[in-house]
Image: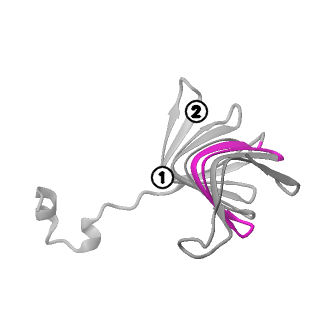
Amino acid sequence: MNDLAAATAHLPQELRSPPPVELKELDRDGIKVIWRFQETLVESQRVRFYGGVRALYGQTLLECEELILDFSNQSGRAIGKVKVTDPEGTIDAENLVFNWKEKTGQAENVRAQGAGMRLQMDRADIKPGVWALRGVRGTPSRTRPPEFELTARKLVLRPGQSGLAI
């Protein structure tokens, strides 16, 4: 038992635990951010949020361990256990770089679910009207392992229009 644990062992549990950190909230330029800790990166004019971050843009919810926002060009980078929940589906990724004004984004090591499909991909580059996915594996199957799986080095989707696997 460490010294702190030994010194506080006689106290009730609620007094032995550190107090919860208060959540803070910011609503600016169309994006609402909820976080526990924050620092301003003066040289780069960016703000770093961390400690269980949630950001809401329209109906899209972004959750991650760390979020760096540049309000001057409406861009950001989500780092660590990134999850995006949208009416069209969900995306889990390691990292996500995005511009909420231009509605673009790039993600790495992505798992996505939507429209009855489960997808895994090495990288996703999203622009309005064109999604370029690399190292793609996908299946509509709900079994594990799936009954069948489709793979492609590159998949270019034009949502609601067409798709091309290469």
Secondary structure under the numbered disc 1 in the rendered image: loop
At x 82%, y 54%, the residue is: 159
Sooner in the amino-acid sequence: mark 1 or mark 2: 1
Residue 144, compared with residue 28, is above or below; it is: below
Q: In this rendering, would 143 be left or right of 150? A: left
Residue 139 on image: x %, y %: 66, 66
Q: Residue furthest top?
A: 43
**Residue at the spot of label 1:** 36
- What span is colored magenta in the figure? 103-129
At x 78%, y 39%, the residue is: 102
Q: In this rendering, would 15 be left or right of 70? A: left
**Residue at the spot of label 2:** 46
Find the distance from the CA under tag 1 to the CA under tag 2. Answer: 17 Å
Query: Picture quarter containing residue 69?
Result: top right
The amino acid pointed to by label 1 is Arg
Residue 116 on image: x %, y %: 72, 70
